[in-house]
Amino acid sequence: MSLSNTNRSTIRAAVSLILVLSIVLTNAISAFAALTPQSVINASATTKYTTDLTQLGRQGRLRENLNFENETARLIKVLAEGGIRQPVIVDSTGENQDAVVEETARRIATGNVPDSLKGISIVKLEVATLYSNAKSDAEVVDLIGTILNEVTASQKGSVLYVNEIANLLESQAVGEQLLGAISSGKLAIIGGSTRESYTDKIERSEAFAAVFQPITLDGIIISGQASNQDANILKGDGFAGDNISSELREMMANDPSGKTRVDVIIQAKDADNAALRSLLKSGEAHVTDRIGNTETMVVNLPLSSLESLSKSGLINFISPDRPTTVTGHVEESIGADMIRSQAALNGRSAYTLDGSDIGVAVVDSGIASTHNGFKNGAGASRIVANVNFTSGTLTATTDGYGHGSHVAGLAVGDSTQSSGAYRGVAKNAKVISVKVLNDLGEGTSSWLLNGLNWILQNRVQYNIKVANLSLGTTAVDSYRNDPICVKVKELVQAGIVVVVAAGNLGKTATGAKTYGRIHSPGISPYALTVGSTNSMGTATTADDSIATFSSRGPTRSFLTTSTGWKVFDNNIKPDIVAPGNRLISYKSANNRLALLSPTLSLDATNNNDSMMYMSGTSMSAPVVAGAAALLLQVNPNLTPGMIKMIMQYSARPISGANTFEQGAGALNIEGAVRLARSLRTDIDFQNAANGSSTVAQGWTMPTTSTTIGGNTFQWAQVITGNHNIITGANLVSKFQAAYKRENIVNDGVTFGNGNFTLNTATHFTAGLGVNRNVTTSNGGSLGAGSIWMSYGVLVGDGVLIGDGVLVGDGVLVGDGVLVGDGVLVGDGVLVGDGVLVGDGVLVGDGVLIGDGVLIGDSVLLGDPTPSM
């Protein structure tokens, strides 16, 4: 059966560019042909000419798109109701149908649809590919018939998505096949069409009009104000907002020619997609690396090629390949010396708590493998794997910089071979060295991504349960889009506790306190982010304070919405703090840091017992990583979310420090181990039901106080979400689904009408409290009905910005008054050139709130700057 002349001309016009492109791609396709498996060559028509969009959603390869919320909701409703009339997405240009269908597929993949749609698949017919490969019109008809037969014969319940369906229906044979399958109930279809084609070819046909129903897509046109879609974009943690990083946008604006070449990280939907590879080639882009077998690539390209990639629909996010840098008596001050000997319990014999058999990956500058601190009592090395992902000699896994050995010593060092001094927290854990910083202490995001991906692929072989990242990069992109944060999420969802240093940007060059400078990936809610305390070199905790260098929250990474608004994450970080000032640990021989600063060395030796001083959140993170290994030795069934809960619940609040400085408080290993020992060890918490008991019958809460160094303190008894604090004993005694690997606390918290509420049906149980109370630096509490941090920012000593309103350029702040050049704020105080705000604090020279502003006690809160 052949197509009519009119139909043929319509379709030929539609695919002519594709046919031309196929000629251009001939050489590239031939080059790839040798790599194509025979199974693909012999694949079914469905495999060759369709794409399972729902499967892409399950793999996290579809970007959340809320631009067409109403149309997506209507499509889901039509599909759920079933019936003969099939939906067709109609708009004036024919450019946006894919967005609606992909978002629907993504929601099916995440289960955010009615029960009748859960488990089905939306399969897209790749019309362009089909026409490019068919030798004749007859073969097109035959192929479509074969695909229809295969789809209707599938047992998994597929919905076929056909864009430009009106053109296909002009073939009498195809039309008859579709109508027959639909009327018999064997086939469900989603169509896509321009408004003109739908009117001419479907609406005017009595047969087709009876089977299809339009879902009109008028698009979103909003100017100068935030839309509901912009507000809703904060829901979930999938890719969101502009798919090009703001840094790259700025580079593009500064180079109109687009000739400047940059190294970028592309998180593609399908890195092997032929159209994507062709687009990269046509834009003179060169793929320099791929992160394992993932969809993430490192690409060198001219700025001019970014826009076409952005609009292609083939990528999730593009960001610069940013540089990574380091972020830099312990046993007694955290209570670790009090819990080494564990008594028999629940049939388990007495044991030494030292991290035995737990794999701890140290992602850093390498480890001095010959140092005695990394040997066991018998003198054998505990380093079970040693890999290098820097651009240097890949076999060179030693630590020429000196940072990694010091970090590893604090987490897993054993002093048995060096006279018993300065041992790490988990002194008998397995050590895995993942080198991502070279011997100058330099690295890139792509090196780090490769290292993290290696951990993910080798976690079972080496029993890797904890990964320590005492390094980071500038936090610009929202954690939803940042490629390192996305990879951290994957590790946590695989059951690995990822401990990350908060960063060392807690003060300016002049010593002024700063906020909003947490590094990436410490901005991720999946990461256990660690700030630093200054223990003053004593075992007592009474004199502890927050180290002045320790980076403070909230996180100021952001995404840009479709209307051009910056939406800042503004999440509470760090999660916890630990000692990090002038800590003594292992020294790699002749390392660069010691050579540049000889005073760091404990002595002048360079042997396998040498020690050195270092300070920084880089030192605090491994203390917490070692503690995580101890908790997993106590109870291997704990999820990463439960590890964070236990540490926060038992933490020691530091007097005079606010929540953005200390999170829940300082690490208290003594309390954390007692709390972990009180939980059941006979159930797999990952598969536990929400609200199921985590404790044995007759359980009582352990004493919620600890005495360290003669100082007795009460535990914090809280956990932190993105923008809230949750309290209640049920955090411990009842399993909260928010602790599952795939969840974060914020998943079960909603904000509306000025209040936070817990979702007790899916993520939390009853008996818990949620509030906005944040401890301020004067020791008081901000809350009791005051709105803070919803989408605004809390700065300084209780100075409040944003009554639940987005903070950005000229966005509503305070009492709902616009902030701009000389515009009134709150109680009528001008913000402008050197004008006083609130209680007489100077606000810059016309600096906007949201992108860099002096607030409260002259604290700078603005766009992140590179780490030091």
Image (cartoon, rainbow, N blue to C red):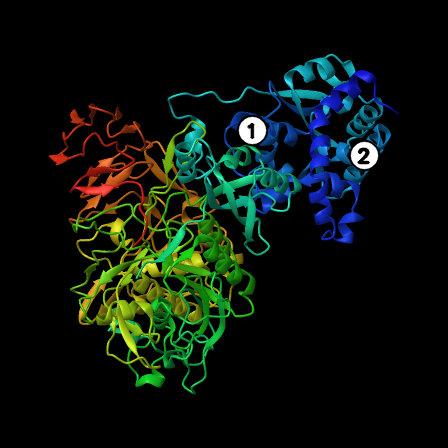
Q: Earlier in the sequence, mark 2 or mark 1?
A: 1
Q: Secondary structure at mark 2?
A: loop
> Which residue bears the numbered disc 1?
73
When the figure is inspected, residue 150 is found, relative to residue 565, above or below; the finding is below
> Looking at the image, which residue is at 37% across and 67% down?
404
Q: Nearer the viewer, residue 770 or 618?
A: 618
**Relative image position of residue 754 (x, y in whole percent):** 32, 33
Quarter assignment of residue 363: bottom left
> Looking at the image, which residue is at 51% across and 42% down?
301
Please say whether residue 91 is visible from this viewpoint: yes
Which amino acid type is marked by label 2?
Ala
**Relative image position of residue 683 (x, y in whole percent):** 51, 64
- Relative horizontal placement of residue 565, taking residue 199 as reference (left or right): left
Q: Nearer the viewer, residue 667 or 672?
A: 667
Quarter assignment of residue 596: bottom left
Which amino acid type is marked by label 1?
Ala
Q: Looking at this view, name the residue that lies furthest to the right.
A: 1
Q: Is the residue marked by circle 2 packed among few (<14), some (14-19), or many (20+) residues within 10 Å?
A: some
Circle on res. 134: 2
In three-dimensional space, the C-alpha distance between marks 2 and 1, rounded to whole angstroms, equals: 36 Å
> Looking at the image, which residue is at 16% across and 41% down?
858
When the figure is inspected, residue 789 is found, relative to residue 322, above or below; the finding is above
Please say whether residue 359 is visible from this viewpoint: no
